Image: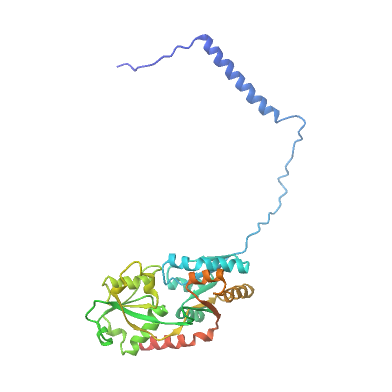
């Protein structure tokens, strides 16, 4: 079969018109080009042997601020982003909130100088102070003026096997992290006071994955995967809209121990640290703008602190580690 072709006849007069239009377009473009190349414009010579160094002015590095990831990154951001913004405005320093995934990563970032201001639990604080020379400079006030806090031991409310501390033997237990204060160290001290040791439990686990570790402990107990959970007090409030809290029973509270702390990494510019400390201590619940910032962060105030304020935590950690 021969290919099919289509032919459109064009008259000689039409070809002439097309040619004239093409010539007009050509001359218009040529004139526009030539008009920019007049004889009166001097020729600029460039000496390629001469070079000039260009100095690039870099903006000052931001001061990094991190909230130990006991809760999800979303909770960390929602609670602290307004506080970070306030610190930047009050000090004139560029500040940036960073989000380590785990307690270990948070501590390591302090050691590498990647976290300048650490907001952390007192157990993590004594670790970064010992390992990396971080130093406490402020502590928070919570609730009705508490500078201390405590942990909780929880189970399902409908678990018929748990009524007394003796019933905890042979059970599966999950805690927040090996370096959690309210979610491990403080309630574990309560277990030791009841005569229990690690060998008495069928299983001891820590919440997996990045962030949200307190919530994961509650959910693990709620689902029945573990019999017991160790959390910090007030964690259950975060899950009030996600689970039926009536299904969770608080078996015990730990003793009260020192609360959360602000620490500066070793080597942070003392002038910058002084500005940040002054701004934090200036926050006042009586000031309407400050009140919004503090309430969002779940604080009622901020006080000066020193390393000596956490000596009790060091002694407790040593006791727990030795008695296990």
Q: Position of residue 151 (x, y in %)?
A: 39, 81
Residue at 40%, 89% in the rendered image: 319
The answer to whether residue 135 is left or right of residue 254 is right
Furthest-top residue in this view: 12
Indicate the quadrant where residue 18 lies. Answer: top right
In the depicted view, which residue is nearer to us: 67 or 5?
Answer: 67
Q: Quadrant of the C terminus?
A: bottom left
The colour scheme used here is rainbow
Indicate the quadrant where residue 62 lies. Answer: bottom right
Q: Is residue 125 visible?
A: yes
Number of numbered callouts drawn:
0
Residue at 51%, 72% in the rendered image: 294
Q: Position of residue 65 (x, y in %)?
A: 53, 69
Indicate the quadrant where residue 47 lies. Answer: top right
Q: Quadrant of the N terminus?
A: top left
Q: Is residue 133 visible?
A: no
Residue at 49%, 87% in the rendered image: 311
Furthest-left residue in this view: 160
Residue at 35%, 17% in the rendered image: 4
In the depicted view, which residue is nearer to us: 51 or 7?
Answer: 7
């Amino acid at each position: 079969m021969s290919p099919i072709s289509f032919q459109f006849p064009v008259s000689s007069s039409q070809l002439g018109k097309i040619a004239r239009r093409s010539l007009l377009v050509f001359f218009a473009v040529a004139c526009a080009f030539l008009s920019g190349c007049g004889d009166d414009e001097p020729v600029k010579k460039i000496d390629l042997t001469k070079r000039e160094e260009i100095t690039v002015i870099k903006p000052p590095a931001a001061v990094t601020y991190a909230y130990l990831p006991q809760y999800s990154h979303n909770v960390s951001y929602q609670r602290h982003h307004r506080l970070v913004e306030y610190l930047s405005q009050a000090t004139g320093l560029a500040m940036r909130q960073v989000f380590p995934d785990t307690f270990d990563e948070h501590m390591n970032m302090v050691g590498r100088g990647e976290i300048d201001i650490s907001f952390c639990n007192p157990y993590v604080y004594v670790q970064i102070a010992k390992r990396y020379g971080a130093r406490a400079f402020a502590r928070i006030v919570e609730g009705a003026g508490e500078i201390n806090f405590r942990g909780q031991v929880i189970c399902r409310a409908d678990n018929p096997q748990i009524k007394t501390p003796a019933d905890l033997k042979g059970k599966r237990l999950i805690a927040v992290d090996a370096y959690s204060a309210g979610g491990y160290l403080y309630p574990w001290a309560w277990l030791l006071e009841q005569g229990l040791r690690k060998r008495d439990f069928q299983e001891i686990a820590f919440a997996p994955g990045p962030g949200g570790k307190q919530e994961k402990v509650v959910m693990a107990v709620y689902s029945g995967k573990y019999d017991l959970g160790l959390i910090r007090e007030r964690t259950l409030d975060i899950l009030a809209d996600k689970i039926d809290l009536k299904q969770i029973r608080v078996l015990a509270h730990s003793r009260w121990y020192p609360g959360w702390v602000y620490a500066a990494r070793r080597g942070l510019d003392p002038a910058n640290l002084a500005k940040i400390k002054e701004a934090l201590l200036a926050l006042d619940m009586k000031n309407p703008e400050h009140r919004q910032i503090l309430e969002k962060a779940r604080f009622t105030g901020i006080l000066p602190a020193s390393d000596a304020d956490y000596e009790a935590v060091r002694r407790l950690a040593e006791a727990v580690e030795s008695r296990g």
